[in-house]
């Protein structure tokens, strides 16, 4: 399949170029030339298919021209080495747990798939691949784990100082080897801006063989569609889900939209945000107004200029009226989120992290207006990644930390501190080239 920029729909590149270059020269985002609709027999049989088979059937239309079946099936199998179970915590109230991977966050699905696709496309290359990634929390850890010690790659992770949790920071800054971390004195939007600036410098992009691991990369976005279909197969036949998505850069919601375009029946998507509510505001007013992000306890959602809005807009042909028919938006404050963490535990016995708690609030609001809806909240990270907030609300010792996260606590953080200055960042990249 070919891919085009959201800004240049008439100009196409192949999958290797879209994946390895990440960002088109015109600063758009890559989109597939068409979104394949999977045959009805696939949808009729999803309750009988394995997670791996679902993943392969979704990935094949996008990558089978460039990756042989045996290699693509291996990539999918290695990506989906852990489950994404749906837990029912109350009547019509479901949670899709996306934190069972190695870094305890949903980003593991996309990062592992993308790392393996990139490794396939660069096999035999003599030039190292430099992977740039901006993170507001979980992306950096997932990418660091997926690429750690992968031959022929080096990873540079930019994160906002003081705006990720302590254990999230340890996931980005303690691996070493081919993984480097830069602590930016600014916001996630600053980190994202610096990454984009590097990609728009064509000379630098060539000399460093740059690629991105953010959800701007189409190879990280497509595998996130896998678990929407996997979630639907875990519900009873005939139940049409309402997916409630804690949203920041909106890659997760965009992946859900791809799944619906491929044929997945969905009643509605709910975009749940913290006070950084650029998209919910757009859904209400039809006016898209990016603005500087504000820090919250749901830090992975602290995005004021979500990159994937360009893809959302393209999928709906810039028709606001059509987008708001399928997507509803809600926003919540930190105080509301804290109260939700306590209420979820009290009402259901379930422990939900701050991001999931924002989603739960939105699901409650949606079911209040639509009592028959079956809401599926995407629980995007394990609560232990936000231990300080969780113990403030639920009490000391109430959250167990999985060993693969606990073992990082005593490791030494190694990060380069930097101002959010494009010239300074580019000079750093030139020195390592």
Image (cartoon, rainbow, N blue to C red):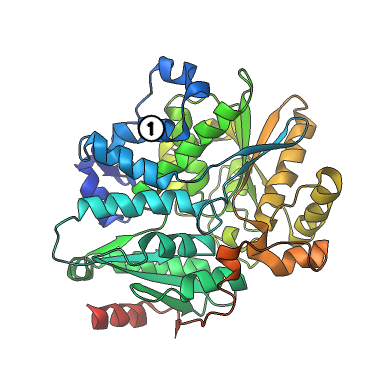
* Percent position of residue 189, x then y: 49, 66
Quadrant containing the C terminus is bottom left
* Percent position of residue 88, x then y: 71, 35
Vertical side of 263 occupied by 341: above or below: below
* Percent position of residue 223, x then y: 41, 42
Vertical side of 408 occupied by 77: above or below: above
Q: Secondary structure at mark 1?
A: helix
Classify 10 Å Cα crowding around label 1: few (below 14), some (14-19), many (20 and above).
many
* Percent position of residue 225, x then y: 46, 38
Name the residue located 36 percent from the left edge and 76 percent from the top edge.
422
Quadrant containing the N terminus is top left
Left or right of 410 on screen, residue 87? right
Nearest the eye: 25 or 355: 355
Name the residue located 61 percent from the left edge and 18 percent from the top edge.
237
Residue 215 visible? The answer is: no
Left or right of 180 on screen, residue 85? right
Query: Label 1: which residue?
Result: 58
Total marks in image: 1
Name the residue located 62 percent from the left edge and 53 percent from the top edge.
277
């Amino acid at each position: 399949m070919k891919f085009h920029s959201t800004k240049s729909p008439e100009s196409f590149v192949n999958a290797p170029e879209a994946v390895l270059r990440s960002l088109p020269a015109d600063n758009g985002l890559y989109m597939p030339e068409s979104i394949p609709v999977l045959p009805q027999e696939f949808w009729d049989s999803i309750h009988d298919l394995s997670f791996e088979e679902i993943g392969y059937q979704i990935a094949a239309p996008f990558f089978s021209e460039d990756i042989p079946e045996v290699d693509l099936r291996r990539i999918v199998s290695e990506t989906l080495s852990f489950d994404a179970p749906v837990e029912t915590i109350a009547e019509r109230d479901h949670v899709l747990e996306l934190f069972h991977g190695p870094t305890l966050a949903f980003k593991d699905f996309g990062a592992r798939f993308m790392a393996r696709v990139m490794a396939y496309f660069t096999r035999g290359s003599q030039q190292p691949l430099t992977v740039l990634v901006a993170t507001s929390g979980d992306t950096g850890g997932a990418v660091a784990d997926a690429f750690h010690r992968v031959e022929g790659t080096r990873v540079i992770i930019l994160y906002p100082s003081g705006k990720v949790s302590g254990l999230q920071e340890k996931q980005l800054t303690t691996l070493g080897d081919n993984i480097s971390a830069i602590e930016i004195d600014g916001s996630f939007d600053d980190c994202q801006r610096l990454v984009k600036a590097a990609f728009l410098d064509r000379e630098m992009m060539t000399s460093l063989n740059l690629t991105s691991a953010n959800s701007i990369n189409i190879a990280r976005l497509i595998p996130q569609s896998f678990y929407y279909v996997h979630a639907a197969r875990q519900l009873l036949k005939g139940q049409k889900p309402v997916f409630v998505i804690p949203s920041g850069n909106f890659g997760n919601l965009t992946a859900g939209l791809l799944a619906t375009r491929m044929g997945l029946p969905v009643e509605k998507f709910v975009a749940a945000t913290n006070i950084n509510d650029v998209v919910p505001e757009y859904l209400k007013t039809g006016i898209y107004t990016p603005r500087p992000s504000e820090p919250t306890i749901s830090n992975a959602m602290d995005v004021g200029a979500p990159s994937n809005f360009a893809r959302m807009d393209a999928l709906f042909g810039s028709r606001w009226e059509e987008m708001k028919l399928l997507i509803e938006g809600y926003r919540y404050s930190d105080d509301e989120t804290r109260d939700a963490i306590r209420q979820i535990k009290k009402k259901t016995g379930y422990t939900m992290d701050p991001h999931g708690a924002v989603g739960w609030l939105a699901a409650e609001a949606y079911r209040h207006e639509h009592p028959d809806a079956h809401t599926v909240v995407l629980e995007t990270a394990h609560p232990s990644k936000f231990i300080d907030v969780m113990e403030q609300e639920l009490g000391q010792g109430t959250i167990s930390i999985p060993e693969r996260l606990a073992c990082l606590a005593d490791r030494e953080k190694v990060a380069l501190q930097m101002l959010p200055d494009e010239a300074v960042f580019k000079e750093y990249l030139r020195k390592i080239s």
